[in-house]
Image (cartoon, grey):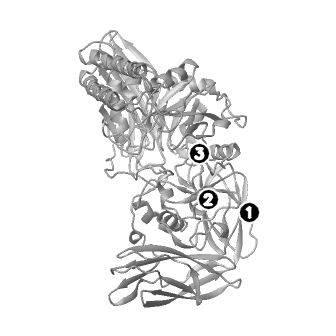
Amino acid sequence: MKIALLFLLPLLTAQEPDYALTAPGHGDLSFWARPENGAARLVEGEAALGDYSRTLALRRSNASLLRKLRDRYFTRVRSFRDFRTPEAWVAQLTAEGLVWRQKPALPVVAMAGATAQVPLLIESDMPVSAAPQVLLNGKAAFPATRLPRYGAAGYLINVPIPAQSGSHAAPLEIHLAGYSAAAVLLFDVRPAATLRVRLSEPARVYVTAADGLSYAPDGSIHRIAAATAEPYFHAAGAFSLTVPAGVARLEAIRGPESVWATKDVSLQPGGNPEIYLPLKHWSDIGTQGWHAGDSHVHANYAARSHQNITPQDVRLIAEAEDLHVLNLTAANSYDNFIHDETLFTGRPHPLSAGRHILYWNEEFRGSDLYGHLGLFGLRSLVRPFFTGLPGSASPYDFPLNYHQAKQTQDQGGAVTYMHPGYLPSFDGLSAAGGQPKELPADVALGVIDAMDVLSNAYETASVPLYYRLLNCGFRIGVSAGSDTFLNVRDHYIPGAGRVYVQSGNPLRYDDWLKAYKAGRSFVTNGPIIQFTVDGQGPGGELQLANPRTVRIRAAVDAQVPVDNIQIIINGRPVITRTNAPAHIDESLTISEPSWVAVRVTGPWERRIVNDSQVFAHTTPVYISLAGRNVRKQADAQYFVHWMQQMIDQVSAAGRFANPAQREEALALLLRALEIYRKIAAGGTA
């Protein structure tokens, strides 16, 4: 299992965390997802850190540096000094004057008639505050505010490139605090060429032109992958791009079951023959009735404005990521506005067809005392959408998550707990809100079907919590939710961590939901797992009268690196393989009530676009012995302590409209506490 990152993520503001790192007027250019590309999207002048880093990401070679400065899509650093990419010009104010610390020597490749963007960093080692003046071709390039004492700032210079190919020079001057520095920006101007591509099937596409920059067609959304800092777009059928002449690299992938397709294309000025790019698949698990879902996708989120992602956009993404069931969640964000509520229909969206189902359901965002629920298969929305939001129509910490989960199950739906946290303890959960503190209570009270073991939180938190719950005898399936905001450019990719559910062919939503609730599932961001115990797959049960051997079969294959494939029994690895593909066919003696699952881990690599490592896990096969199920008293005692803390916190800090609400809330939590006490004492739940 991976090591938890111990830094705290930025606290949420009234917007997305990195929206605070966007300068006024630049949000539409760098932060929000909009279907425009080209010069209209270029950030210019003094840039906020987020705008600057997202612009640097357009140069594909910067990905490895930028990835070190990010935790997924969050910017971890707060200094421009960390962003010295090779193409940046870096000037520094010192006691001796304004000096160049970095001057790129090679000409920058640029397309004739286009606009080139040159990153400029100005750093100060002096206790003075002054506004730099930046001149391009003898004219002010843009207005700039004061450079702080001992500070640094980033600027983006938009350089008009002449229509003629060849060499081009643009004089650059900086004047700051009575000092000056001059240089000449050099460009290798290439004529424009047309890249025309036809895909064999919808895909996520990466295009890197001869200038080293990423391109996307007009009308598409030029996105940035969270963990890789690489720009991409989704496409189906044919598309065309205008790029500099020279060698362009074309790459495409369609979910974890496809092979990464790569082709280098030499483009001549003007038109070029259409390039056909076939997508090939290495896994046929779909023919065995396994269908991939994502429990947690927001089409539009984070602000009342920028509600511009349509069901047609979502349908293209589902096809391009080969994602079969999207649980799209209507929800509030930081106020009482409910995003995408109007898209709820109580059934799969009319654009659903074949092996791609879009279903707008709901994320219930319980009070920070409770956590967030993912609701599936709703026939009617569960209200309220949130609790514990001061100044709203739901300011109180009531109803509990339990009530909303039960309403969902009562109408035939399914419930999962989303993004379980950052450390596997009551106090170490999500620092960014959404703590699943009510999770053990709701599992004990029987209203939870699954848990997002793979999510935008860390498996170092989710896996130990999941194992402890299983060791108390509860049966809950694994689930996966990306928590993608599709209207934000730089964010998670839906289905990059996904839950596969075996519901048979053809895919029908009701069948899929029933199998999801039964735990016939595994989660993965790359590896594919097939697994049985005496013929029972994930979610299945064996009832043994006496201790005996069982036959464990597992097959793991992947196109990503794998270094640990483990058969887990009651939380302990009992069989290990170190490479994929791997085939396990062994008999083990079961001498106590058990659950048996498969866990797969491996190092990060480029195809892992949402996470920091390779990860996959199955729902267990459950084995009872002489009518007894798993009951680990130490794990139950862990949750006794958890529930006692929960009750103390709700009692002391809970906000309720009246004493009856408080009493009902505490009574529910006390019911759960008694269940864990009984298990801890050696009884049954």
Q: Secondary structure at mark 3?
A: loop
Spot occupied by residue 264 in the image (x, y as percentages of width and height):
61, 66
Mark 2 or 1: in front is 2
Please give the name of the residue rendered at 31% of the width and 30% of the height, measured from the top-left corner.
652
Q: Amino acid at mark 1?
A: Glu
The answer to whether 302 appears left or right of 424 in the picture is: right
Residue 370 position by quadrant = top left
Q: Amino acid at mark 3?
A: His
- Report the front residue among 17 and 261: 17
The quadrant of the rendering that contains the C terminus is: top left
What residue is disc 3 on? 281
Q: Earlier in the sequence, mark 3 or mark 1?
A: 1
Q: Which mark is residue 274?
A: 1
Marks 3,1: beta carbons within 8 A:
no
Q: Earlier in the sequence, mark 3 or mark 2?
A: 2
Q: Earlier in the sequence, mark 2 or mark 1?
A: 2
Q: Secondary structure at mark 2?
A: loop
Spot occupied by residue 321 in the image (x, y as percentages of width and height):
60, 46
Other residues around mark 1 within 10 Å, as few (<14) / some (14–19) / many (≥20): some
Residue 276 visible in image:
yes
Residue 621 visible in image:
no
What residue is disc 2 on? 222
